[in-house]
Image (spheres, rainbow, N blue to C red):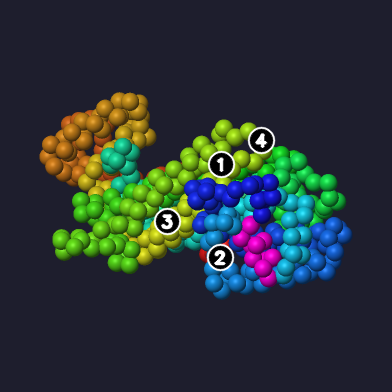
Amino acid sequence: MWGGRFADGPSAIMREINASIPFDKALWRQDIAASKAHVAMLGAQGIIAAEDAATISAGLDAVAAEYERDGVPEDWDREDIHMTTEARLAELIGPVAGRLHTARSRNDQVATDFRLWVREALAEMDAGLAELQRALVTRAGEHADAIMPGFTHLQTAQPVTLGHHLMAYYEMFRRDRARIAEAAGRLNECPLGSAALAGTGFPIDRAATAAALGFARPTANSLDAVSDRDFALDFLYCCATSALHLSRLAEEVILWASQPFGFIRLPDSLSTGSSIMPQKKNPDAAELVRGHTGRVIGALTSLMITMKGLPLAYSKDMQDDKPPVFEAAALMGLSIAAMTGMIAESSFNTERMRAAAELGYATATDLADWLVREAGVPFREAHHITGEAVKLAEARGVALDQLSLAELQKIDARIDARVYQALSVDASVAARASYGGTAPDEVRRQVAAARRALGMEE
Ligand code: ARG
């Protein structure tokens, strides 16, 4: 298609290094849609004859039907999806096919196709994350009262509720979805009609093709439009941040499923066994979600590095924009689905969680707070007194609320019997009813607000 000025054909190496059809065939639906929008506009503007436009459009439908039925053929001589489609179109309808490429270039074509693809990928990721949020909110509602140890530094810190913990992830995925919406907003401009880089002398109607492809408007600068891959970087950043959140959730699932924790029993459907140790049930799906995150972050890094040195406008380096985006999208689809299944179908061992919360002196802060509130002790002094109580309980191997009143009063005479109400894990979580806090009623309020936001019935 570009051989006019060449005496020799490309070497085998050139053909191989040049070919993007092995991966960009994934763009075939977008390529057909953009070509149909373009040819309809060429016909409407009188740039080509209306009959020719109709013939080409019908021919594109025929090519699409073949792709749908047989897949896209991978012929390196046809380089990419754009030339593959055009060549097949010419086989089907003859030389009139050559009029399709009037007033366009593969540079604006690929920029348009790829935007259309990423627009769908963003929508799919958003739908997947919404499903995951629904699973989290459902389980959080079931376990708004279930007490577990809350950790900082992975040391038992204060009791929290399982519902509160799950709702923390709901918030992360809420921010991820807001990022996706912003990315979709920025992507919403159509490069088609920018041509190779400088625009075109033909009287095209860019607003018409933009509208036909569902974009808000045409891009404003043709040089920028053919060389911009920010929409792909935005997408990969959305993927990377969300993968990072999924990975943290996966890490917790892995810890919780381990025998020393024993907080969660994973569904058989998302676990594997060991070929040598019959007792094992491995959290492979969660481990792979954690592992895939490295590849997704790598995809973002890869495209940033591809783009960072490119002068305006298009350079062939940009052909390498697609594999990282396709890989990240596929990994995200799997990871989100796997975590959704794990959250929806695991069973939580809430007795075990509660026992762990009771073991770790998680209510020490409540003793200090009680001394401040009921005995007027300055917090720093209360912290010290409480430390003494923890030391004694530890030495005796008992929980804080198993120390006798005499023992507590020996540490500080201002302590009285009312303190025991503050030392239970139930009292501790119930007291933390500040906005966003862990108290069961407050968690129920958070769950109700989330259910409304997700359009779930209450
Ligand atoms: N396959 C190319 C890509 O993905 C299409 C654009 C090629 N343009 C060009 N002038 N060689 O980037």
Helix, strand or loop for the magenta stretch, by majority: helix
> Farthest front residue?
7
**Amino acid at pointer 4:** Leu
Report how far apart the C-alphas of labels 4 and 3 lie in the structure. Answer: 36 Å
User: Hey, what amino acid is under mark 1?
Assistant: Asp
First in sequence, mark 4 or 3: give its number: 4
Q: Which residue is mark 4?
A: 312
Q: Amino acid at mark 2?
A: Val
Which residue sits at x=84%, y=66%? 50
Which residue of the protein is positioned furthest toward the left in this rendering? 396
Q: What's under tag 3, amino acid-wise?
A: Ser
Residue identified by numbered label 2: 72
SS label for mark 4: loop
Q: Which residues are magenta?
A: 82-92
| Residue 420 relative to residue 447: left or right | left
Q: 124 or 303, which lies in front?
A: 303
Label 3, label 2: how many angstroms apart (C-alpha)?
A: 27 Å
- Secondary element type, mark 1: helix
Numbered badge on residue 445: none
Q: Which residue is mark 1?
A: 317
